[in-house]
Image (spheres, helix red, strand yellow):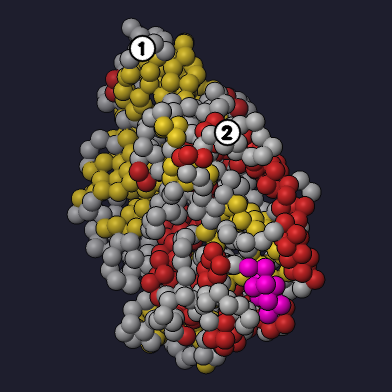
């Protein structure tokens, strides 16, 4: 349990019908008559406002050789309250423990801990404890019973659904408060206009897949709320229940409960709370990734000659034209189906180095791209294990996801293949690796090679820890996660926010959905990756220049800029149009103001939080913003074919007319006049970026 690792400085025990814990703006009330908890936050204008009402924590557990039990706090006859002074990564605070037990069944108890600090959030967890070994795959520290109102009634109020991963074209959703949702690891409920919001989420990702479920009615009332560990369903890529954790005490993930005057700040604060427990991967010192990715246009037709030609085009034209990061570097990332020999890989890395570039390569460490009749082959020429040995079994059968068998991350055959692959890449000279289909390593299996591992998350952590051990030998590799869950996050320098995204306006909209809903992941990933940016693709109907501006705006507002055209004039593959791509590159990729903005490497946040472009709960927002010490950037993308006219009040941007000196639209280079609001008119399938030069105060 978390409390056991804390410095215990004082303790107190008492029995009372109502126990009230107050700290700063927080108030936690335990009512003994119903064994339930209320959590309130004191708003300066409204007084105490409800955050959680009538919560009766619940769990499911099984005793060895016994049947399964589902219990809530109300099922116990006794409660013991204790408090302890604590000092953790979150600072100094107090742990308030509520232990539930029965006089007649002394071998089982349930404990809910609340960890209270001088913060806008509190933390909680739930454990089931026994004198003998038990197992559990479900623990819900927050489980409400009965309706309560959390927002001032307004049609612009929303609840944020966060997807588990970025596969199958999933989206972030901002639902009206009139239905049900399950959000993975974290969710938010907020008022659209005032931005007041509540954030719930897990801040530990070592054992569990966790979720937030909300059932709301049309009058901004929460009918039920559950924050729990042990989710497993189609959206988490599982077809069997979450694995059961065993021990004499089984504990949920540590859960965040935050009340924030601006829910966007709350999501960022939640992300930073995660980092207090598990730092993100910050090994990359080479600056914001600008460069090229082979998959978007070349795809399976990539070749050594194309790679060299593109490298030279970047060196001779794009880099001198300003399409590079502030260290003058470009990344040349070669994807799957690279079609290169070992010798060509070595030569390409050397060629890129001569061009002041970093060469990248591709792997999918937990995915085996074999047919069933290949499973009895050796997984690797140097291995004693077959593919059948190494793939996970679900309901007794080898399991596939996205067309590939899912490898057991704990299996020595899988680990050996990872080690050999990364040693080869490092010896060839690669310093950047795109790591794809990692969700295949987090599917719940019947069992794992490591018998101590019970859950998919535990297996993923073991396998990826081995991956990092190899990747960080000598100079650490830049690890660019592609198809991957959001959590755990510590294995990637970057992560794709939306996968399979080329250059059409609808694809920019899909990628921007992940910016306007998930920008906050930039707090634990060094870079959010918008996927390959295509200017001129393979479709007969080519992308317009407006679509190019929208897609590059999307890239710069995400935090990475890897373009993906075919720039080789000599290539005969028929992929793309190198002449047109070069023409577009000169117009689109050499804008110094846009590249300066992209160099920041940070994701923009939504301006509204409720005003999506087409009114749908899963659509992207048109308007996003980023504030720096020098500038305020406002990007507006028109995802429709018709002209978009609109305005943004300065209040919504957090400024007034005396805060800035000039406003420049970066794509046109024109100065914009505005007094109390920003007015825009944007052609169909196009974008504008407004840069406010802020006054020094």
Give me the residue at 25% from left, 46% from top: 215
Cα gap from disc 1 to disc 2, whole angstroms? 37 Å
Q: Which residue is mark 1?
A: 66
Q: Residue 38: which numbered mark, if any?
A: none
- Horizontal side, residue 350 vs residue 589: left or right: right
Instruction: Determine whether 696 is above or below 119 in the image.
Output: below
Give me the residue at 41% from left, 28% from top: 396
> x and y percent of residue 468 in the render?
67, 44
> x and y percent of residue 535 in the render?
51, 78
Q: How many other residues sit within 10 Å of disc 1, few (<14), some (14-19) or many (≥20)?
A: few
Give me the residue at 38% from left, 21% from top: 61
Give me the residue at 34% from left, 28% from top: 58
Q: Which residues are magenta?
A: 303-313
Q: Which residue is mark 2?
A: 386
In front of the other: 657 or 273: 273
Instruction: Determine whether 199 is above or below 496 in the image.
Output: above
Q: How many other residues sit within 10 Å of disc 2, few (<14), some (14-19) or many (≥20)?
A: some
Could you tell me which secondary element the residue under label 2 belongs to?
loop
Magenta span main SS: helix
Instruction: Determine whether 653 is above or below 688 in the image.
Output: above
Whether residue 345 is visible here, answered yes or no, is yes
- Residue 208 is one of the magenta-drawn residues: no
Question: Within the image, what quadrant is residue 523 found in?
Answer: bottom right
> x and y percent of residue 74 in the render?
29, 23
Whether residue 431 is visible here, answered yes or no, is no
Could you tell me which secondary element the residue under label 1 belongs to?
loop
Q: Residue furthest top?
A: 104
């Amino acid at each position: 349990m978390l409390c056991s690792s804390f410095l215990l400085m004082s303790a107190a025990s008492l029995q009372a019908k109502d126990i009230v814990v107050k700290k700063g703006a927080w108030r936690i009330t335990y009512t003994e008559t119903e064994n339930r908890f209320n959590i309130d936050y004191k708003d300066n204008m409204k007084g105490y406002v409800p955050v959680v009402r009538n919560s009766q924590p619940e769990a499911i557990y099984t005793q060895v050789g016994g049947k399964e039990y589902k219990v809530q706090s109300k099922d116990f006859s006794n409660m013991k309250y204790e408090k302890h002074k604590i000092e953790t990564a979150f600072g100094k605070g107090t742990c308030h423990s509520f232990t539930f037990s029965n006089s007649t069944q002394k071998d089982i108890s349930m404990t809910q801990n609340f960890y209270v600090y001088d913060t806008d959030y509190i933390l909680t967890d739930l454990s089931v404890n026994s004198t003998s070994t038990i197992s559990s795959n479900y623990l819900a520290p927050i489980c409400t019973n009965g309706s309560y109102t959390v927002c001032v009634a307004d049609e612009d109020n929303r609840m944020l659904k966060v997807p588990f991963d970025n596969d199958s074209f999933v989206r972030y959703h901002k639902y009206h408060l009139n239905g049900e949702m399950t959000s993975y690891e974290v969710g938010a409920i907020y008022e659209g206009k005032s931005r007041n919001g509540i954030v719930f989420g897990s801040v530990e990702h070592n054992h569990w897949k966790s979720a937030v479920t909300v059932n709301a009615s049309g009058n901004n009332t929460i009918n039920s709320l559950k924050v729990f560990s042990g989710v497993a369903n189609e959206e988490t890529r599982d077809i069997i229940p979450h694995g059961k954790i065993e021990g004499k005490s089984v504990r949920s993930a540590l859960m965040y409960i935050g009340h924030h005057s601006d829910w966007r700040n709350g999501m960022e604060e939640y992300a930073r709370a995660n980092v207090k427990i598990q730092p993100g991967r910050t090994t990359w010192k080479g600056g914001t990734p600008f460069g090229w990715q082979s998959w978007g246009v070349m795809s399976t037709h990539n070749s050594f000659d194309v790679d060299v030609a593109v490298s030279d085009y970047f060196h001779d034209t794009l880099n001198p034209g300003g399409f590079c990061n502030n260290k003058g570097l470009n990344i040349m990332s070669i994807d799957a189906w690279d079609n290169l020999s070992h010798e060509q890989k070595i030569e390409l890395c050397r060629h890129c180095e001569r061009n002041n570039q970093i060469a990248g390569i591709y792997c999918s460490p937990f995915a085996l791209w074999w047919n069933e009749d290949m499973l009895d082959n050796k997984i690797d020429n140097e291995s004693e294990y077959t593919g059948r040995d190494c793939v996970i079994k679900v309901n007794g059968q080898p399991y596939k996801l996205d067309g590939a068998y899912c490898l057991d991350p704990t299996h020595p055959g899988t680990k050996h293949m990872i080690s050999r692959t990364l040693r080869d890449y490092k010896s060839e000279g690669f310093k950047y690796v795109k790591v794809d289909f990692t969700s295949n390593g987090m599917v719940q299996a019947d069992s794992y090679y490591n018998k101590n591992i019970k859950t998919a998350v535990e297996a993923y952590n073991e396998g990826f820890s081995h991956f990092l051990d190899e990747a960080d030998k000598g100079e650490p590799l830049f690890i660019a996660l592609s198809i991957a869950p959001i959590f755990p996050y510590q294995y990637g320098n970057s992560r794709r926010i939306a996968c399979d995204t080329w250059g059409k306006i609808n694809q920019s909209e899909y990628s921007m959905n992940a910016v306007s809903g998930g920008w906050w992941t930039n707090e634990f990933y060094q870079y959010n990756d918008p996927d390959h940016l295509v200017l001129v693709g393979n479709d007969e109907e080519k992308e317009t220049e407006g679509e190019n501006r929208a897609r590059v705006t999307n890239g710069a507002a995400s935090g990475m800029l890897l373009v993906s055209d075919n720039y080789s004039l000599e290539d005969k593959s028929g992929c793309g149009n190198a002449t047109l791509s070069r023409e577009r590159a000169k117009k689109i990729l050499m804008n110094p103001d846009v590249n300066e903005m992209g160099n920041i490497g940070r994701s923009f946040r939504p301006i509204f939080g409720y005003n999506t472009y087409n009114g749908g709960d899963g659509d992207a927002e048109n308007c996003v913003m980023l504030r720096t010490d020098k500038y305020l950037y406002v990007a507006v993308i028109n995802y429709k074919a018709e002209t978009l006219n609109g305005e943004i009040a300065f209040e919504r941007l957090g400024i007034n007319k005396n805060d800035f000196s000039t406003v420049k639209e970066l794509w046109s280079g024109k100065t914009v006049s505005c007094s109390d609001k920003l007015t825009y008119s944007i052609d169909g399938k196009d974008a504008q970026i407004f840069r406010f030069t802020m006054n020094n105060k």
